Amino acid sequence: MTAPRAGSKIQIQSYKHNGHLHRVWESSIVLKGTEQVIIGANDRTLVLESDGRTWVTREPAICYFHSKHWFNIIGMLRDDGIHYYCNISSPFVYEDDAIKYIDYDLDLKVYPDMTFDLLDEDEYQMHRNQMNYPGVLDRILYNNINDLQRWVHQRKGPFSPGFIDQWYERFLTYRW
């Protein structure tokens, strides 16, 4: 797998287990690109939903993708602090100037005080039944939720103090 170059623009493409495109973030700037980790950023970027609807993100976001973990982490810079939205997903692949991953519905929403909520378990169960997820996938996903919660408690990776701010400062050097 190749890696995107820092400063390049890429799409972020989210798919469902059945291969259908779920959501596309039209343009993000790569801040760090290796075969294992991609850190990107966007602000007021166009998002296209699979049903044809579109919307624009409201605040700057730092996006963290890892090729070995079944989650990705979005740190959103808001007036009251950094809010995190963590997608439980397949590890990413990078091809055709896009980060691609399978979204498995479960999300961990982390607040500035590092408390969190697990979201969309009902949607996960519905899609698990509809798309016949294998039992091993269920175990992988829930193990990764546990890993992700440990990262929050330990302030690891994107949850470490200064991580999002540092990458946001780098993002600002590309924006203007």
Image (tube, grey):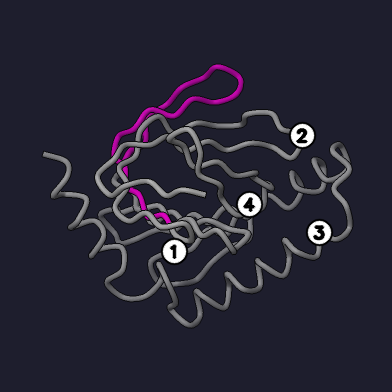
Mark nearer the N terminus (1 vs 4): 4
Identify residue type, mark 2: Asn
Q: Which residue is mark 4?
A: 89
Q: Earlier in the sequence, mark 3 or mark 1?
A: 1
Compared across the picture, whether 57 is left or right of 36 comes to left
Q: Earlier in the sequence, mark 2 or mark 3?
A: 2
- Which image quadrant is residue 126 in? top right
Identify residue for label 2.
18
- Residue occupying image coordinates x 38% and y 36%: 10
| Amino acid bearing label 1 | Tyr
Residue drawn at (16%, 49%), measured in percent from left and top? 172
**Residue under the image location 41 percent in, 54 percent down:** 38
55 in relation to 8, above or below: above
Q: Which type of secondary structure does the marked residue at label 1 adopt? A: loop
Helix, strand, or loop for circle 3?
helix
Provide the secondary structure element on which disc 2 rests.
Answer: loop
Identity, as a three-letter code, of the amino acid under mark 3: Asp
Q: In the image, is residue 70 part of the stretch drawn in magenta?
A: no
Query: Is residue 55 on the magenta stretch?
Result: yes
Q: Return the residue at label 1.
A: 111
Question: Within 10 angstroms of label 3, few (less than 14), some, or many (20 or more) residues?
Answer: some
How far, Cα to Cα, is label 4 from label 2?
13 Å
Camera-near label (1 vs 2) is 2
State which quarter of the image contains the C terminus.
Answer: top left
Label 3 sits on residue: 138
* Left-right relation of 148 to 8: right
